[in-house]
Amino acid sequence: MPAVPKRKISKGRRDRRRAHHALKARHLINCTNCGDQHLPHHVCPNCGHYAGREVIEIEST
């Protein structure tokens, strides 16, 4: 026979267990070159700068 729970888990206990499952908002910083927001420790996708210097060249359209 398969394993089955001995007692019903109450809604309160279930919800307390899931209290930490919510998604958190991303922490964004402003680029020092163009002012656009990007993730910290990542190259700016708008201008290609990181740590005050150009790391990748972005084609302008």
Image: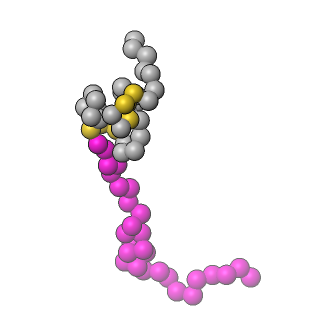
Q: Of all residues shown, which one is farthest toward the bottom?
A: 6
Q: Up-down: is 56 above or below 18?
A: above
Kindly identify the residue that appears in the image at 36 percent across and 27 percent down.
46
Q: Which residue lies furthest to the top in this view?
A: 61
Q: On the image, which quarter does residue 19 sit in?
A: bottom left
Q: Nearer the viewer, residue 15 or 29?
A: 29
Quick one: 41 or 20, which is closer to the camera?
41
Quarter of the figure with residue 6: bottom right
Location of the C terminus (image quadrant): top left
Q: Give the range drawn in magenta.
A: 1-29
31 lies left or right of 60: left
Give residue 32's position: percent from left, percent from top: 27, 34
Numbered label tally: 0
Question: 27 left or right of 14?
Answer: left
Tell me, yes or no, if residue 11 can be seen here: no
The residue located at (40%, 44%) in the rendering is 41
Instruction: Say which of 55 and 15 sits in front.
Output: 55
Magenta span contains residue 56: no
Find residue 33 and report its image quarter: top left
| Visible residue check, residue 58 | yes
- Rendered residue at 45%/26% (across/down): 56
Against 47, residue 26 (above or below) is below
**Residue at the extreme front of the image, as rendered:** 53
The percent position of residue 25, horizontal first and vertical second, equals 33, 51
- Which of the pair 33/25 is nearer the observer? 33
> Residue at (36%, 45%) from the top-left corner?
40
Name the dominant secondary structure of the magenta segment. loop
